[in-house]
Structure formats: structure tokens, C-alpha cells
Image (cartoon, rainbow, N blue to C red):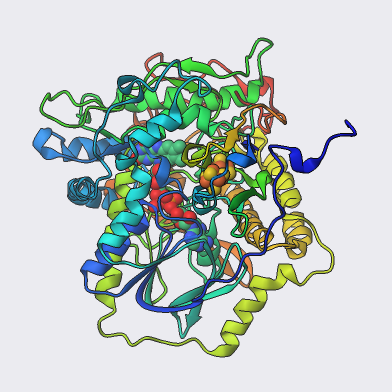
């Protein structure tokens, strides 16, 4: 090093990390506590307030910047004024989502989605404004040349991020930020609030509430590269811990699992998240159902299997390439405002799905029962809403018919849960937790700070990713690959998790997040073992075919500290025509190996992969029908 | 990791980065009125701090510093 170098001269020298003071207020009471404030949480909070409740919002980060909601860039709603056909929509969901879509919830969506669109419009979320290309800030799609900051500053009044807090303020709903909820207070079979800690200072935060709504999103094993932000399966953890069923884990991990660089969300997504939210929808008709679903399967499911098992090509490039603007769901009616998505050029790299193990949108989470239409859990005083939190299974086993509707759907779920929670509190008195229970929760929250020696949660994160990222865990599964991975995760659960050490308040958040991720890894593996068939995003190379014996939801419940499975039968009208022969019933796509296992002729009208994974993968275990 | 400091002297103490980062990467020194990139190893590279940095003190890097953890492209 140059001897004249003085660290304090460096332009990049960071100051020492200061200690953060605890917030002035650490104990709260309210009628309705909303935990997490993305699309679901915001709508839940406002609906509960409109129902007359005294509402409080708490978020691990800051509403508008923390979860997935800050990044959604299209918004779809059902609009019969422009010819949307309920029958066609239902058929599409049934077939494209592999006959596992929860049509009860889907119908509920069609009732409320337009109202939600109007609501979000009135709150300023859906204002359309000039694109980067139109305003002159876009140069060539390379973030080094484009004036992204100038664009944001000029369009600041429209920035969707600020609208969360503006809306809470408008409805006079107070919110507590940077507070990670780690446990629910359960007393006499009722949830009476939640406990967590203020992340920067580690101060314990206690919330007593007559009703609680979880809107905490899902999670992923690897948030770097795709913004799953604060979401780390915290609500799955809470639900499982308190004996609620968890559903849909075998389908989790639906984005491509790629990332050439640890950090390129900005370069790959900047224009999409800075420009307006595009209004989408309006192209669902009976004739277009099958081709739409097939096109999605060709884009999303088949290439994922193929590229994962094939590996990189000799000439695969790893740099970011410019891609043209994308359209989607464009309505044919010129008076329909749903014009589809059209952004300034995006430099697209291998980014989507860098979030290994991310929830299938609206597919997994806490299961509330086959007739539930408000997110009411099996525990008194507890509701759930939103992506990865309410396991409403509306996307069934895939996401082929749902693109662009999650932001609207999460808002509908939030609205309904908030309304029900708000209406429930009028004849309930505010409970108080007994001190011993609070002490126990506190001990568990701070356990990682009490260790003398232990494992750094960042080390654990890297190890978990190494275990869960391989394609034989997430993309092409077999009994052997799942069983061997499960034994690694069990070891991780027993040896590493109890010894996660927090040497700072920041670490404490990471320790709890790791604990939740490991639980979800185990659930994912066990659910994948349990579902001995292939369907949607769940591809078992040893069972490469759909098997209608598995036309059910598999839920995981904690019993005697073990994971137990229960099967939930679907309603008959959700199952499609089960009398059709296999080749007619399943026409969206063929899994690799499916034709052979089912003795089917190759049908060129059904997308299939030319790639046979047995070249790369030991499929001698493949079962033939 | 992707957030990075370009020039600490340009930090005008607007607190935006510290207020909005969802991954708890920042701290703030209220005496010196400067942000601190405290935990860059947990940056999810969303770019929100970079875009909101009023002093243009923060930068962004998208170089590959380690190899992809998955086999797909
Ligand atoms: C890059 C990207 C692009 C997308 N594009 C689209 C699109 O074009 N159209 C579309 O419809 N959808 C899109 N989506 C999906 C959509 O954004 C999500 O499905 C939706 O925003 C989920 O909303 P939510 O409210 O359920 O969860 P989230 O927005 O994830 O909110 C969860 C909240 O809970 C908080 N939280 C988590 N854990 C805790 C805890 N322990 N304690 C306290 N708070 C906690 C988080 O901080 C967060 O604020 C996209 C998502 C991403 C990431
Ligand atoms: S890029 Fe995103 S995650 Fe990283 S420091 Fe900035 S705001 Fe935080
Ligand atoms: S956003 Fe920029 S100017 Fe503002 S505190 Fe952070 S580094 Fe400083």
C-alpha cells in the first residue's frame, strides 16, 4: 500500500457503525393489528379502518419499499364492461393451473377486482405518466448511460413507493416501521397480538390487538438478485408454530433460478419499477384459453427444466443484453384502458428467479379451508392475506393463467380480510398477555444474542443456498435427490439453527430469517416427496406425469413437533372434466419423459421439451403407468 | 453485493438510504449527518437507495463478484 495513504482521505471510507437508540414507544394496543404492508396489508388496514376499527400497521421495513409490492409493474382486473367472460376465465384457471386452482377465491376476485382497481387509482397508484423513452431520460437501456435518477426525481409526484405511506396518512392509520414480528401471542386458542423487535436497535416491541391480520408475503432462500426484500417466510413460521396447516410448498420456486451477478436488479428492472404500473387484462376468451396457457408453459416451465439440466452452453454469454419493451394482456377494445405493459427498453440479464425457492404467487402459505373466502385462519382473532401468506392456492400448481393479476388479487384478499377483522372487534374486549408467556417469547427471540459461540447467519445463508439451489432440489426432483437433500436440511435444522449467533441487532434479524427459511426448506422437500406425480412447477423425474389421485391439496401440520400431511379434497367443479382421457385432459404441455411413461404418441400441438433429462439425470427410477 | 460508496463527502445526510433500505444495510450517524453502508453483504441490489440518494454519494455495481449458484441461464 502507498505509505502516504490515509484511510480518512478515501472517498469511500465508511464511518464506524453507531449504536441505534430504541424507539421511544415499544408497547402498543389496537383493535386490528396489520403485520406487513404491501398491497395486501395496505388494503387490509384501510378496510379495517373503514369498518370502524382502531388500526395499527407494523412492517419489518418501510411500507412502499420493503416487500414485493414495490416492484409489481402491471395490474390486471376483471371487467365485464369490456367483454371479460367469467366462464372463460374460470375455465382458463382450471385448465392452465393444472386443475388445482381454488375457483372459490378466483370467483371472489372477479367480484372485487374492479373496485380495487378504482380504489388504487383514487389513491394515486395507477396514474399513467411518460415513459423514460418519452421523457428523454432513457438513452440505451444501460443504467450507466440512462438518467434513471433524473427520471425518478422528475416523476417523484407519481412514484408508487410514496403512495403507501400517503394512503396510511390519509386514513389516519399509524404505522410502526423496521420491526420484525417473530411470534404471535396465543392465549386460550386466540391470537391477541404479536411480539417482535425493532431491527436497528433490537428493542423488544409488543403489540396487543383484538384481531391480527398477517400480510407478510412469502420468501426465498436467496433474495439477492430478485427483490423479495423483507420477506423470509415469516408467516409460514408463525402459522406452523401455532398449529395451522401450510399448503403448496411443493410448487414453490417458480421463477428461473438464475443469476450471473449477485446484484443486478437495478440494471434489469429499473425501468419497469420506475415507470407507471401498466394496466392489463382483457384478453381472456374461450378460444384463446389453451394457446395462452401453452405459450406460458413454453416460456416458463419447459425452458426452466431444459436449461437447468443441460447446464451452460459453450457459448452462453453472461452479460446483460438489451431487450425490447414487452407487451402483455392487451385488450382488443380501443376504449378499454387496459393497454398492456410497454416499458422503455430493458437491459435483460439472467435475473428472474435469482430468488431460489420463492413462493409460487398466491400458491402457498397458511391454509384457511376449502370454503374460506376472507382469510380467516383456524385460530381465533387471526386472518391472513396476500402472496405467500394466505395459501389460497388460487394459482393451483402453476402460474400459467395468472400473470399480472397478483397485485390486484393480493389487494382483494387484504380488503376482505381487513374488513372481516375490522367487523369482528366490536364485541371483543382488549386482552392482555400474561407475563410468563411474554417472558418465554422474549427468551426465544433473544436466544441468538445469548450464545458464547455459534455460526454466523450469513455463513448459514450461503450453506442453505448451496443445499437448496441445485436443480435436483427445485426443478427436477426424484425420491433420491429429495431424500438426500432432506437429510442435509435435517442436519442443518438440528446442528446449525440452534447455534445461529447474533452479534448485532442486524444479525438478530438474519438469525430469525434463517430459522424460518430452514423450516420452509424442510416443508418444501417433504411436500415434494409426498406428491408422487408431476404437475405445474412440481416436476418429479421419477413420476413424470399427472396423476389424478393427487388432485388434492397437501397440507403440513405440526403434530408432536413433527410435520404431518393431510389431504384436502377439491370441490368437484374445480377438477375439470375428469372423465376425459389423459391425452385430452392434459394439453397445456408435456413434461420430459411423460409421453414414454404414459405410452402417449407425440402430439405436435402440445408443447413439449425436445430435451430428455435422462441424458443428464438418473431417471432409471422412473415409474411407468 | 451491489450498493457502493462513490464519494462520502457528497452525502448530504438526507437519510433516504437509511430510511428506505429493506435489507437493513444502512446506519446513520446523527452527529456527523452521514449515512454508513454497514452491512453490504445483505444488499438485495434493488437499487432503491441509489435512485433516492439526493447527494449522489451512493453508487451501484453489477459486476459479478461470485459465480451464479444455479446451473440454469
Ligand atoms: C420484480 C417483481 C415484479 C413483479 N411484477 C408484477 C406485475 O407486473 N404484476 C403483478 O400483479 N405482480 C407483480 N409482482 C408480484 C407482486 O408484486 C406480489 O405478488 C405482491 O406485491 C405481493 O403483495 P403482498 O402485499 O402480499 O406482499 P409484499 O408486498 O411482499 O409485502 C409483505 C410485507 O410484509 C413485511 N414483512 C415480512 N415479514 C415481516 C415480519 N416478520 N414482520 C413485519 N413485517 C414483515 C414486508 O416488509 C413487506 O412490506 C412482481 C414482483 C416482483 C418482485
Ligand atoms: S440496493 Fe436495495 S438492498 Fe441494497 S443497500 Fe440499496 S436499498 Fe438496500
Ligand atoms: S441517500 Fe445519499 S445523501 Fe442521503 S443520507 Fe444516504 S448517502 Fe447520504
The image quarter containing residue A280 is top left
Nearest the camera: B15 or A100? B15
Residue for point 22% across, 74% down:
A52
Q: Is residue A336 left or right of residue A581?
A: left
Whole-percent x, y for residue A463 in the image = 74, 46
Spot occupied by residue A137 in the image (x, y as percentages of width and height): 38, 23
- Residue B7, picture quadrant: top right
Count of picture labels: 0
Up-down relation of residue A85 to residue A393 (above or below): above
In this rendering, the answer to whether A492 lies above or below A281 is below
Foreground pick, A28 / A614: A28
Q: Quadrant of the N terminus of chain A?
A: top right
* Residue A222 visible from this viewpoint: yes
Can residue A556 be spotted in the picture? no
Residue at x-position 33% and y-position 57%: A42
> Against A87, is A172 above or below?
below
Residue visible at 62% across and 68% down? A202
Given residues A461 and B55, the one toward you in this image is B55
At a point 69% along the width and 26% down the height, the residue shown is A617
Q: Left or right: A363 with respect to A459? A: left
Horizontal placement of A585 versus A248: left or right? Answer: left
Rendered-image quarter of ligand 3? top right
Residue ranking furthest to the top: A315
- Quarter where residue A513 is shown: bottom right
x, y (%) of residue A398? 43, 38
Q: Position of residue B32 (x, y in %)?
A: 62, 55
Amino acid at each position: 500500500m502507498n505509505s502516504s495513504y490515509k484511510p480518512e482521505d478515501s472517498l469511500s471510507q465508511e464511518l464506524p457503525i453507531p449504536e441505534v437508540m430504541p424507539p421511544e414507544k415499544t408497547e402498543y394496543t389496537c383493535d386490528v393489528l396489520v403485520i406487513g404492508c404491501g398491497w395486501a396489508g395496505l388494503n387490509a388496514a384501510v378496510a379495517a379502518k373503514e369498518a370502524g376499527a382502531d388500526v395499527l400497521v407494523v412492517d419489518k421495513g418501510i411500507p412502499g419499499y420493503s416487500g414485493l409490492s414495490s416492484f409489481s409493474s402491471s395490474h390486471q382486473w376483471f371487467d365485464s364492461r369490456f367483454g371479460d367472460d367469467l366462464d372463460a376465465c374460470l375455465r382458463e384457471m382450471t385448465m392452465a393451473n393444472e386443475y388445482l386452482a381454488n375457483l372459490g377465491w378466483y370467483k371472489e376476485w372477479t367480484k372485487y377486482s374492479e373496485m380495487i382497481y378504482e380504489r388504487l387509482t383514487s389513491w394515486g397508484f395507477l396514474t399513467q405518466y411518460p415513459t423514460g423513452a418519452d421523457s428523454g431520460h432513457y438513452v440505451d437501456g444501460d443504467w450507466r448511460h440512462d438518467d434513471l435518477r433524473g427520471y425518478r426525481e422528475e416523476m417523484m409526484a407519481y412514484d408508487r413507493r410514496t403512495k403507501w405511506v400517503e394512503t396510511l396518512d390519509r386514513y389516519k392509520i399509524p404505522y410502526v416501521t423496521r420491526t420484525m414480528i417473530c411470534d404471535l401471542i396465543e392465549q386460550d386458542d386466540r391470537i391477541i397480538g404479536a411480539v417482535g423487535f425493532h431491527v436497528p436497535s433490537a428493542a423488544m416491541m409488543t403489540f396487543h390487538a383484538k384481531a391480527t391480520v398477517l400480510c407478510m408475503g412469502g420468501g426465498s432462500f436467496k433474495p439477492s438478485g430478485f427483490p423479495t426484500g423483507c420477506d423470509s417466510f415469516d408467516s409460514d413460521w408463525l402459522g406452523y408454530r401455532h398449529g395451522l396447516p401450510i399448503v403448496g410448498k411443493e410448487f414453490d420456486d417458480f421463477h428461473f433460478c438464475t443469476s450471473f451477478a449477485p446484484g443486478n436488479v437495478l440494471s434489469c428492472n429499473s425501468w419497469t419499477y420506475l415507470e407507471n404500473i401498466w394496466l392489463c387484462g382483457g384478453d381472456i376468451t374461450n378460444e384463446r384459453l389453451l394457446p395462452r396457457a401453452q405459450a406460458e408453459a413454453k416460456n416458463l416451465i419447459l425452458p426452466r427444466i431444459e436449461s437447468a439440466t443441460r447446464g451452460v452452453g459453450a457459448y452462453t454469454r453472461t452479460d446483460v443484453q438489451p431487450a425490447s419493451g414487452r407487451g402483455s394482456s392487451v385488450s382488443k377494445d380501443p376504449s378499454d384502458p387496459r393497454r398492456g405493459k410497454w416499458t422503455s427498453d430493458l437491459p435483460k440479464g439472467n435475473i428472474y428467479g435469482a430468488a431460489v425457492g420463492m413462493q409460487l404467487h398466491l400458491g402457498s402459505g397458511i391454509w384457511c379451508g376449502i370454503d374460506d373466502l376472507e382469510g380467516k385462519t383456524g385460530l381465533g382473532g387471526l386472518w391472513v392475506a396476500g402472496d405467500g401468506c394466505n395459501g389460497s392456492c388460487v394459482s393451483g400448481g402453476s402460474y400459467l393463467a395468472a400473470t399480472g393479476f397478483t397485485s390486484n388479487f393480493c389487494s382483494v384478499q387484504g380488503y376482505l380480510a381487513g374488513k372481516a377483522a375490522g367487523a369482528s372487534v366490536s364485541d371483543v374486549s382488549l386482552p392482555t398477555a400474561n407475563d410468563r408467556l411474554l417472558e418465554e417469547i422474549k427468551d426465544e427471540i433473544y436466544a441468538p444474542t445469548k450464545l458464547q459461540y455459534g455460526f454466523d447467519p450469513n455463513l448459514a445463508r450461503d450453506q442453505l443456498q448451496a443445499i437448496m439451489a441445485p436443480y435436483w432440489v427445485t426443478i427436477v426432483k426424484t425420491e433420491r435427490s429429495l431424500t438426500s437433500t432432506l437429510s442435509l436440511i435435517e442436519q442443518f435444522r438440528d446442528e446449525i439453527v440452534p447455534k445461529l449467533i447474533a452479534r448485532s441487532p442486524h444479525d438478530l434479524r438474519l438469525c430469525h430469517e434463517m430459522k424460518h427459511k430452514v423450516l420452509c426448506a424442510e416443508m418444501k422437500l417433504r411436500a415434494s416427496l409426498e406428491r408422487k406425480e408431476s404437475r405445474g412447477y412440481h416436476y418429479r423425474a421419477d413420476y413424470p406425469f399427472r396423476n389424478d389421485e393427487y388432485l388434492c391439496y397437501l397440507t403440513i401440520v405440526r403434530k408432536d413437533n413433527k410435520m404431518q400431511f393431510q389431504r384436502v379434497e377439491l370441490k368437484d367443479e374445480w377438477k375439470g372434466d375428469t372423465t376425459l382421457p389423459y391425452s385430452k385432459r392434459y394439453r397445456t404441455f408435456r413434461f420430459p419423459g411423460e409421453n414414454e411413461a404414459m405410452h402417449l404418441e407425440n402430439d405436435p400441438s402440445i408443447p413439449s421439451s425436445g430435451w430428455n433429462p435422462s441424458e443428464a439425470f438418473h431417471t432409471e427410477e422412473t415409474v411407468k403407468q | 453485493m451491489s450498493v457502493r460508496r462513490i464519494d462520502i463527502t457528497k452525502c448530504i445526510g438526507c437519510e433516504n438510504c437509511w430510511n428506505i433500505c429493506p435489507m437493513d444495510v444502512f446506519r446513520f450517524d446523527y452527529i456527523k449527518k452521514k449515512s454508513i453502508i454497514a452491512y453490504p453483504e445483505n444488499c438485495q441490489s434493488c437499487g432503491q437507495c441509489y435512485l433516492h440518494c439526493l447527494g449522489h454519494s451512493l453508487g451501484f455495481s453489477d459486476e459479478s463478484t461470485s459465480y451464479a449458484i444455479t446451473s440454469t441461464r
